[in-house]
Each structure stands twice: as structure tokens, then as C-alpha cells.
Image (spheres, rainbow, N blue to C red):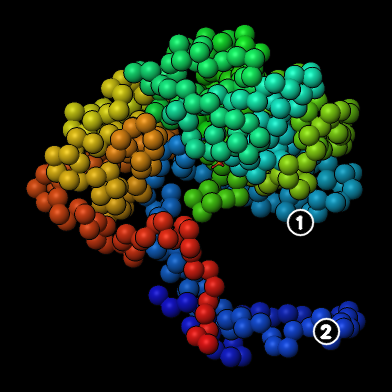
Amino acid sequence: MKLLFERSCPGRGAALLPACDVPAAEFDAALLRDQAPRLPEISEIDLGRHYTELAKQTHGVNDGFYPLGSCTMKYNPRVNEEMAALPGFTQIHPLQPVETVQGCLEVIYESEQLLCEITGMDGMTFQPAAGAHGEYTGLLLIRKYHLSRGDTARTKIIVPDSAHGTNPASAAMAGFQVVSVPSNDQGGVDLDALRKAVGPDTAGLMLTNPNTVGLFDPNILEITKIIHDAGGLCYYDGANLNAIMGHARPGDMGFDCVHINLHKTFSTPHGGGGPGSGPVGCKSFLEAFLPSPRVKKNGETFSFGTPEQTMGQVRSFYGNFLVVVRALTYVLTLGKEGIPEASAGAVLNANYLMKKLVGAYDMSYDTQCMHEFVMTLQGLAHDTGVTAMDVAKRLLDFGIHPPTMYFPLIVHEALMVEPTETESPETLDEAAEVFLKILEEAKTDPESLHHAPHDCAIGRPDEVTAARAPVLRYSFGE
Ligand SMILES: *Cc1c(COP(=O)(O)O)cnc(C)c1O
């Protein structure tokens, strides 16, 4: 496929600018470039075709099944987009006087009330731009809390070995030392190891529940009690909230603060890497430390306020506001009945698909799952040489996005499948057939699977180089 630079033709363009109606500004010649930037010059139709061609080479939730575990790639109702595109939400400026954007403040306020109700928290900030950023913010809350009590010895954060990589990374960034605790054979936290890990240096625990193997930890109340008894706080990584919303609340499990990934659970498109939103909720005793500003309601009017011992800002202004508009639309559309129905559907769909595959594929934990399940292809790799990567790549030929691969790290040759509630039984049946067909191919023609996908624009990119040394500049060949 040709690049825009290669299609460029001098003098072409796609912009029709009105005549300038303000005086031209004079700049010091020393500040001006000698040569105009060499941007591609291209007509509107060629530009449109270029991006359409690029779009055709990707796989999105509108193209087909997208069971990417831990990411909750569900279908996003179009009405969310319509609400987020309303001029009252888009044609505003963050520095506008608050009297002129009362509706926007109300959106943040309402979203805070509803999401606090869903998570069992008392207050929330919408500044963090995604889950990992929320983790960092939550850890700063924990740090501020301990320091405000003069307790400077709490330097360690406990993280189970099944945790998402962002958990230990955020803890380290927030200045804590990370203590890893192992999982037990049921996939939950090993309580004895946890009891041994806590002490006067424990600042807190970070936990996902259901965890990254798709299992709800039945010992959750005991886990949070062990941490609290040791003087630590409990942070809930809410990335898997899609499994429990409307049924169980982190606040009732003993968690003191939580982030939610609005782009996962509350339906914002996020395949291309954003924008996201990772609001952080907390119990009332932590509210004074939340980032500033926060929306307040006085009678019928809304304004901004600064929490007394605020950590300051973790991002400019108020976060990714339009993602919050989508989340509020989603919650209000589903309502009190729809929210628990959505999570029940997510759990049902995961168990339905797992049951169709169990016996053929090995499950990492052979028990009922929550919203996702993890298969281990170690046996298959041993018998046929076909790896989790080969199976994932072959799925692309059938129009299915690969599941999450090689995560969580505690499962070897892992494929982590999260169908979500927005898929029909027919889609799940078709996906199960494809998985079983690939298993047949692994036994009869393993060699061809090493070269899959066969029908995609790009087959097996060098993923490490693509991530570490991406080519982001066009060279004019000089
Ligand atoms: C996605 C995810 C995160 C990180 O969230 P981002 O929004 O991608 O920053 C953290 N923990 C778990 C379990 C996740 O699945």
C-alpha cells in the first residue's frame, strides 16, 4: 500500500479555507522556517481512499468476534456516540466560566453518583486517562493517607503473581516496593503466603476480582481483612468489573479505593488505544486526598472545589470528558435492571463457550469461570509443535480477533478468551467450531499453522521491533 507521501502531488489539496478576515501577524524572520514543511499534498478523494484502505486492514468489533481477554471489547451502542457528539459537549472550552457549562458539570456529578453506587465507593475523580493511570492515582491516595497519619514506614505494596503487569509497574512508579504473593491451586490468593507477607511496612494490596484467570476469589473478605489488620489499605483493579457489576461491589468486599476502565466496562471504543478513562473511587476517609478539582453541587448549581489535602492534578483539566458522557449514556440506558443483566450475560457467554471447548482444549482451571476463561496450550505445543501464537494467528483467517496471548504469566501457552455479553449464541457456536477446526489442523497439518494467517494483509510482524523501534518518520530519500 502506498503512503500519503508517495501519493503526494504538488498543488493538490483537500482544504477550502475562507478568506482571512483578521490582520496578518508579522513574525521576526529569525523565527520563520526557510522552507515550507513537506506535507503530503493530496485530493480529498485520494485521502478518503487511503484511510478506508487502512481501516480495511484492521479488525474491529464491527468486523467480527473480538474475544480479547482482560480488555472487554464489547459492542458499543451507537447512541453513546450520538450523545458524545452533541455540540453542547464538544463545542466548549475547559476554561469557560462554569455558569456556561452547567450541563457538563452535571454529567460528571451524575456519573460520580452512579459509578459510586455500582462500586460501593463514596467519592470519585475522573481525571485519570486510563486504568494504569488510575492505579497510579489510587496508590498516591494510599501514600497520602499513610503519610497524613505520620506513618512513614509503609513502603510496600502486595501484588498477587496473577496480576496485570500494570499493577507492579504503577506501584513502582508511585515509589513503593512490590511484594509478589503466589496463587494457590484454585487460582486465588494463597492466604498463608499473604499472612506471611504483611507487616508494619505494608502500605496496601492491589487485587483484581475476578482475577486475571477469570475466577472470583471466594476468600476475598479474609484477604482484605488480613491487609486491614496489618494497617494497610486495599486497592481494587476494576478492569474486570464487567463480570460483577450490579451483583457485587468492591466497596462491600473491603476495598478502600478502586479504578474502573470506562473504555472497557462502560462501553467506549478502545481498540486503537484510546481515548480512555480510568476514574478512581474511594471511601469517604480518602476523599480529602483526591485530585483537584472536583465537581460540587450546591442546590441546583454545580461548581468546582478543591479537596482539603488534595494530591493536586494528575492530568490537565477534568479528564477525557467525552468518554464519561458515553459511560453515563450507557448506564442510564441500561438502568438498574440492565447493568446486572449485562454482567450476567458476560458470565453466561464465557461459560457457554468454555463448555463447548473443554475436553478438546485444556483449561488452566477446570471450573466454572466468570466473564473470561484461560486455556493452556502447553500439551498441544508438546504433542504437535503448534503454539498459542499459531492458533491465535490462524483465527484471523476466520475473521476472529485473537484472544489475549501468553497472559497471565502464571499460565503456560495461555489463550485468554472473553466473549462479552454482546455476542449472540450463533457467534459463539461459530467461534467454537473454528477453535475445534484449528485443533484438527494442528493434528493433521501443523506446519501450515506456523505460517498462519494466510489471508491477512500482514501476517507475522516482528512485534518486538514494531514496539521498540517503530518507523514513524518518512524519509524523503536524501
Ligand atoms: C486493562 C487492564 C489494566 C490497565 O488498564 P488500561 O486502561 O489499559 O490502562 C489493568 N488491569 C487489568 C486487569 C486490565 O485488564
- Tell me if residue 118 can be seen: no
Q: Amino acid at mark 2?
A: Ala
Q: Which of marks 1 and 2 precedes in the sequence?
A: 2
* Residue at (48, 63) in percent of width and height: 469
- Vertical order, 427 against 360 (above or below): below
Q: Are marks 2 and 1 in contact (CB under 8 Å)?
A: no
Tally of numbered tags: 2
Quarter of the figure with residue 368: top left
Q: How would you rate the neighbour count of disc 2 (Cα within 10 Å): few for under 14, some for 14-19, many for 20 or more?
A: few
Closer to us: mark 2 or mark 1?
2
x and y, in percent, of residue 355 in the image: 26, 27
Q: Nearer the viewer, residue 46 or 460?
A: 460
The residue wearing badge 1 is: 91
Whole-percent x, y for residue 74 in the image: 46, 41
38 in relation to 450, above or below: below
Identify the residue position indicated by label 2 in the image.
30
